Image (spheres, helix red, strand yellow):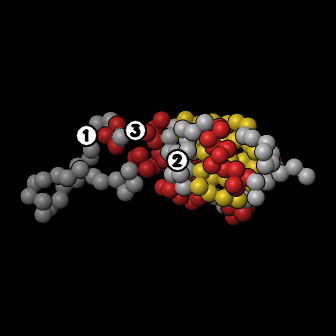
Amino acid sequence: MMTNTWILVSNAAEARLFLNEGCGKGLHLVNNWVHPDSRKHEGDFITSSAGRVQQSDAHGARPAIQWKTSPKETEMQHFAAELVKYLESGRMTGAFQHLILVAPPHFLGLIREHLDNPMDALVRATLDKDYSQEGEPELIKHLTGILCR
């Protein structure tokens, strides 16, 4: 029986999804994404001056309103949710039996937050590294130990 493994190699601004059909079978690109809003600086999200609030003890000063979650972090969360939605559709159609997640620590955490229990059960391994710029031969070197066990 053939076992298909999907490998998501991502950072907060771009991702590639590969299929592996077994040890020594290489990687086949399934999909790729680019999310440029995750790459923006905080100041790039501001289209006009920040809102102001009146505070009685501020002697007339009006500080800018602070975001609870920065716009950049919000964009990273949206991208993580978009990726997991795609993975979920693949899980529902039986396109893969195992999942490997490769992303920098913070973004890997955002992806993991969006996984439900059935999807989380398919996660075979995680690598908290940014290999998003690596070519397929380098990725295979990094993943061989996981794919061939």
Query: Which residue is situated farthest in the left direction here?
Result: 59
Give the amino acid type for the residue marked by disc 1 in the picture.
Answer: Ser
Is 78 in front, or is 100?
A: 100
Q: Which mark is residue 130?
A: 2
Q: Nearer the viewer, mark 1 or mark 3?
A: 3
Q: Nearer the viewer, mark 2 or mark 3?
A: 2
Residue bearing the label numbered 1: 49
Q: Earlier in the sequence, mark 1 or mark 3?
A: 3
Q: Earlier in the sequence, mark 2 or mark 3?
A: 3
Apparent side of residue 71 relative to residue 27 in the rendered image (left or right): left
Apparent side of residue 70 relative to residue 114 in the rendered image (left or right): left
Q: Position of residue 94 (x, y in %)?
A: 82, 50
User: Total label count?
Assistant: 3
Find numbered disc 3 in the image and state the secondary structure of the residue it sits on. Answer: loop
Q: Which mark is residue 148?
A: none
Mark pair 1, 3: CA separation? 18 Å
Give the amino acid type for the residue marked by disc 2 in the picture.
Answer: Asp
Find numbered disc 2 in the image and state the secondary structure of the residue it sits on. Answer: loop
User: What residue is shown at x 75% (from left), y 49% (from top)?
Assistant: 5
Find numbered disc 1 in the image and state the secondary structure of the residue it sits on. Answer: loop
In the rendered image, the vertical position of residue 34 relative to residue 3, given as above or below: above
Residue bearing the label numbered 3: 40
Q: Residues within 10 Å of mark 3 (few under 14, many from 20)?
A: some
Q: Position of residue 125 (x, y in %)?
A: 66, 58
Is 132 in front, or is 26?
A: 26
Q: Residues within 10 Å of mark 1 (few under 14, many from 20)?
A: few
Residue 78 appearing in the image: no
Apparent side of residue 136 relative to residue 95 in the rendered image (left or right): left
Residue 40 appearing in the image: yes
User: What residue is shown at x 72% (from left), y 63% (from top)?
Assistant: 121
Apparent side of residue 118 relative to residue 79 in the rendered image (left or right): right
